[in-house]
Amino acid sequence: MTIKLYIDDPYLQHCTAKTIRQTQVHAKPGIILDRTIFYPTSGGQPHDTGRLNHVAVTDVIEEPNQQIIHVLEKPLEDSQVECEINWERRFDHMQQHTGQHILSQALLKTVGAETISFHLGEQDSTIDINQAGLALDAVIGVEKRANSIIFENRDIIGHLVGKSEVHQFPIRKPPTVEDHIRIVEIKNFDYSPCGGTHCSRTGEIGILKIRRHENYKGGTRLHFVCGFRALKDYQAKTEILKQLTTAMSAAEPDLSQNILKLKDDLKARRKERDDLKWKLLDYEADSLYAKGTQQAGIHLIKTIFDDRHPKEINLLAKKIVSLYPDAVTLFGIKSKANAQLIFRCSQTLAFDMGQLMKTASSTIKGLGGGRRKQAQGGGPLVERLEDALQGAENELFDMIS
């Protein structure tokens, strides 16, 4: 069994250890030491990184027999090694994990919500609780309660006990091990069985900020940051706010109102644009109909458009067949990547646009289909688009004859 020095002293950044065994993890070299300061991935907290004799440690895994494997960047044959952890990463994890203990107890005491799971991520951390629909004022209250405990700079104490002694502590959740149970106490506030690394006083957490919360699997997921992560988050948001106030030529208190006004103005401009676009389609529909050909009692409009949006051309075809009872539109759209086909006919005409589309889309090596009055398709052979439309025209007049 590897001696876990980080349990008694999470602030230990260096140590000397002896090699017990060389191994491999997924074809990567690994080493087991007689003792270690490296924390393995466990309980929602990621592993430490660092170096063994200047060889990078990329992962840390705990085996069922409590031996700890240090996965290495390259093999290390030395029998004695100098261990050095990445302290910045370790202390960050200590801040986030200790903050989670406080946040979980604050949720329990403030809104009666129990923590189901915890995940310490690269950007922020999350906890899932068994209560959905948390109101914003409730979340603010929980956040305030958690930070009041942080600001009081309470002691954080580790107790190593047996199974028979656990009842002496008002633990928030049951332990997952049978013996050598480590209970982390946040003085007179939270008692939780946990094998992770934690700060020695709550003041080291600095501040806890709940970034957002959302309903998740019948409960709520809260995203939060602590310590230097919270500082970094605040710095980033301050810079964004500065950029917005400059762009909007507004002071911070007026920013929200100005953005809402801008949003309303943009909505009005979009409506005006859509109205004008609709009118332009009316003019374009009339112009295309006038350029069409009259034959055998139908008015055929056959056109190829360059780089037009299919939705817009579909609206144009719909306008024409709704305005003119004798109209058939055979439209193609040409772009660098592919060709699109949009066929429509007036409701009074007895043609099958879906049948025409199957033939035309095969010409451009694509797929297509639809109903009797409208059909759509496409394919990659842009150079065959004119042939596809001409084939559809020929088939249309064959239907008449």
Image (cartoon, rainbow, N blue to C red):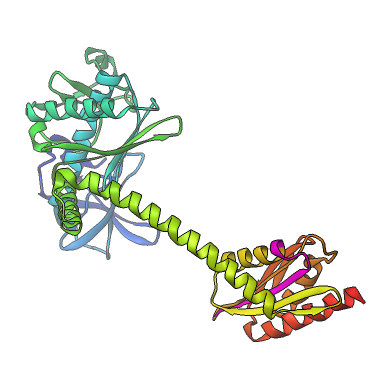
Residue 136's spot in the image, x, y percent? 29, 30
Q: Residue at x 78, y 81 (%)?
A: 391
**Which span is picked out in magenta?**
322-335
Could you tell whether 178 is left or right of 106 in the image?
right
Foreground: 142 or 202? Answer: 142
Q: Is residue 233 above or below residue 168?
A: below
Residue 287's spot in the image, x, y percent? 63, 76
Could you tell whether 270 is left or right of 290 in the image?
left
Quadrant for the N terminus, please: top left
Quadrant for the C terminus, please: bottom right
Residue 267's spot in the image, x, y percent? 39, 52
* In magenta segment, residue 364: no
Q: Residue at x 85, y 73 (%)?
A: 297
Q: Residue at x 22, y 25 (%)?
A: 141
Foreground: 144 or 63? Answer: 144
Residue 302's spot in the image, x, y percent? 70, 78
Residue at far right of view: 401
Q: Residue at x 15, y 43 (%)?
A: 253
Viewer can see residue 284: yes
Quadrant hosting residue 209: top left
Foreground: 136 or 155? Answer: 136
